[in-house]
Image: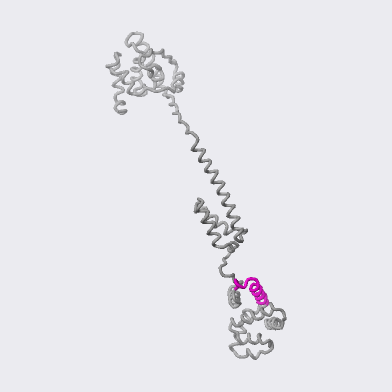
């Protein structure tokens, strides 16, 4: 079959077919079958005596078994070689190299300087110029690297112009996002900082026995005032609350005696205290005022500051907590 194709090609009057024929002859030279190529070049398709010797016969049989099946494809490849040589002779391979690459890989070789993929037709200096310009304008290096990788996989990027257009779209998108981010940061800097308002102190929570002790201390303090044992309701409450609640007496006294944290010399207000544990619990839970400190409570029950007969006992009750507080 190969002899028939070669004979037809050798006697054809068409220029490209004749070049195809000579290309096939050159492939025979590449394969080392010089005798067979001479037979084809001379046009004597019936002169088999050129391959009667054993060495040439073995080469011919190897070629026929290995490459006889795609014989028609050889002619098509040769036509393609001729067309490429006529269209871009400066970028095409020599026929010898075409034959070697096709016989080894089964594919036509690529022109020198070209890579794989659709983005291989983009010139290197085009990519470099776009990258340098983007880095100079402040685009992060990691972003530029990602753009190059994405465009190298883009099906529609096939030449310099398509690469530049796609790169320009990426630049415009990044500039819009960067501008929005800068405006948002500027508004955040210009906005006045919110003045943090301190959260109100939580209310006072006591157990039922403690509530009972508070009600008993209030009742006893009123009795002391009525009997003349103490002339200050605040100091009487401080003494009895310290004896019953120890360190918890300071916040409870702040809720029961509004004048305790007021300015000095202010006339004492009458303390209105609920008579039931439930009412007292609600009153203490709703208290949001400033609470009295432990040292201030100690001054109210100090024996040198108060003439109450149990002031010394109340002060000794608070003494361990005063040492811990200091």
In the rendered view, how is the structure colored? one colour
Number of numbered discs present? 0
Vertical arrangement, residue 228 with respect to residue 17, above or below: above
Q: Nearer the viewer, residue 135 or 310?
A: 135
Q: Residue furthest top?
A: 227
Residue 249 to residue 37: above or below: above
Extent of the magenta region: 72-92
Please provide percent x and percent y for residue 265. Answer: 35, 14
User: Residue 133 in magenta?
Assistant: no
Question: In percent of the image, x 55 and y 48: which residue is there?
Answer: 175
**Residue 72 occupies quadrant:** bottom right
Viewer-side residue, 242 vs 113: 113
Q: Can you give x and y, in whole percent of width and height, for residue 257 in the image?
A: 39, 17
Residue name at image x 43 percent, y 15 percent: 273
Position above or below: 77 against 297: below
Viewer-proximal residue among 75 and 200: 75
């Amino acid at each position: 079959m190969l002899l028939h194709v070669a004979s037809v090609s050798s006697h054809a009057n068409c220029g490209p077919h004749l070049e195809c024929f000579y290309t096939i002859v050159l492939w025979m030279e590449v394969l080392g079958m010089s005798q067979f190529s001479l037979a084809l070049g001379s046009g004597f398709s019936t002169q088999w005596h050129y391959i009667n010797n054993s060495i040439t016969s073995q080469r011919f049989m190897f070629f026929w078994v290995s490459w006889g099946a795609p014989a028609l494809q050889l002619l098509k490849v040769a036509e393609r070689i001729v067309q490429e040589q006529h269209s871009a002779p400066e970028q095409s391979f020599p026929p010898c190299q075409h034959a070697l690459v096709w016989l080894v890989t089964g594919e036509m070789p690529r022109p020198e300087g070209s890579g794989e993929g659709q983005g291989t037709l983009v010139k290197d200096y085009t990519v470099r110029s776009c990258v340098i310009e983007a880095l100079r304008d402040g685009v992060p290096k990691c972003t530029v690297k990602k753009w190059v990788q994405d465009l190298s996989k883009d099906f529609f990027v096939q030449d310099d112009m398509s690469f530049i257009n796609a790169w320009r779209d990426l630049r415009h998108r990044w500039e819009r996002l960067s501008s929005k981010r800068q405006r948002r940061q500027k508004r955040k800097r210009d906005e006045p900082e919110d003045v943090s308002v301190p959260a109100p102190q939580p209310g006072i929570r006591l157990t039922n026995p403690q509530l009972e002790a508070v009600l008993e201390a209030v009742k006893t303090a009123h009795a002391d005032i009525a009997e003349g044992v103490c002339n200050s309701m605040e100091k009487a409450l401080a003494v009895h609350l310290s004896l019953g609640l120890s360190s918890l007496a300071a916040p409870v006294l702040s809720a029961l005696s509004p004048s305790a944290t007021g300015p000095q010399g202010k006339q004492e207000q009458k303390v209105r205290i609920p008579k039931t544990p439930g009412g007292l619990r609600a009153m203490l839970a709703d208290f949001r005022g400033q609470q009295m400190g432990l040292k201030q409570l100690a001054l109210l029950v100090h024996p040198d500051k108060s003439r109450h007969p149990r002031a010394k006992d109340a002060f000794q009750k608070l003494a361990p907590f005063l040492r811990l507080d200091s």
